[in-house]
Amino acid sequence: MTVEFFREEPAARSSWRLAVLMGANTRTYKFALGEALLGAAAEGRTDLPLRDLASPYAMSLVKHLAQAPQASSRSVAGGTDFLTVAQEEAAESIQLGSPTERLLAAAMESMPKMVMQKFHNLRGDGGAEVPHRFYEVTGSSRERVVRLAEHLREVALSEQKPTLQAELVARWSIVETSFAAGIGRSLMEEGVAVDMTTLRITDKERRRSVAGVTEAVIGFQHGRCIICAQPLIPGVDEIAVDHVFPYSFKRLLSGTKLDLDAIWNLAPAHRPCNGQKSNRPPSRGELTRLALRNEAIMQSPHPLKRTLHLTLKRHGYSGGRVGDWWDFIEGVRNQFQ
């Protein structure tokens, strides 16, 4: 399905989304690197010393460390591990507004060996990489240079850059929350809930806010409106969260366990499109886009994947077979005919 996701929109931003949204996560290094890369490319940088990328990378991580764990409990950190150094240097770095020399040196030492080697890797695809590469590391170990690719500049300067940044922030929040004691276990076992008042994803046990619904799922539908399939641009377009199967259909579902307020049925849309759609049944195109979006989420790591998997299981599907979402959505559609 990662191939199918790229085939839907074979562009550099789809490769970026594959890397950020669908890669394996035992630590959050990828998100800090992605944030630093977007920032450098947006400034017009092409070749830059590793130090210039390591500084924002390290600062992003120490700021997030103050909010939540940045590694899985299964990922054991030793005394010289970068996260250990980051924790020890966090307070002073935040006070300075820049990384301490020790933290910067640790970042420059670890980045080429770890996150920069793995950023382009596809999860579980035997060492395969995303179709576009966004940088190369050149130079000697004493003076490494990061060469930013044209593909990265294309992403960072595109109209969808605000969407891509919001997706990265949301994904980072989801992943780091899944690492947190108590909350993380709830997310991994039970998936997420949706607070329809605030349109935010929460954990089911403590109802802690994790991320906005729009920001969490929009990347899996290529940053496009579920109704008209045109790009959604934060700050330019008014965005609504659409019930693909209208909420008014709920009265027809007495006696069933189908939840129309769940992630599987919620999708970002232009507010005017959402208003015009109102309570009408979804079109074939909208159902196709919803199925593709949900299949894409199933290729991401927990907990969004877990949420959709549980929805399928409750309704008699294995949740592990490609095509389950097509069958499920078709089954729901048939209930309203």
Image (cartoon, rainbow, N blue to C red):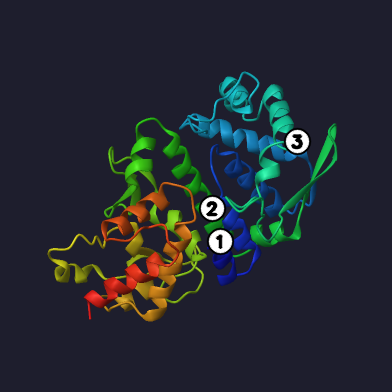
**Mark 1 / mark 2, whichever is N-terminal:** 1
Residue 267 coordinates in the image, percent (x, y): 38, 64
Residue named by callout 2: 22
- Disc 1, SS: helix
Mark 3 crowd level (few <14, some 14–19, many ≥20, 10 Å Cα): some
- Disc 3, SS: helix
**Mark 3 / mark 2, whichever is N-terminal:** 2
**Residue at x-position 53% and y-position 53%:** 21
The kind of residue tagged 1 is Thr
Mark linked to residue 2:
1
Q: Distance between the residues labelled 1 and 2?
A: 8 Å
The kind of residue tagged 3 is Arg
Relative to 100, residue 328 above or below: below
Q: Is residue 245 visible?
A: yes
Relative to 11, residue 189 above or below: above
Q: Nearer the viewer, residue 216 or 256?
A: 256
Q: Is residue 270 visible?
A: no
Mark 2 crowd level (few <14, some 14–19, many ≥20, 10 Å Cα): many
**Mark 1 / mark 3, whichever is N-terminal:** 1
Residue named by callout 3: 51
Residue 228 coordinates in the image, percent (x, y): 44, 77
**Residue at x-position 53% and y-position 63%:** 1
Q: In this view, does 48 lie to the left or right of 43?
A: right
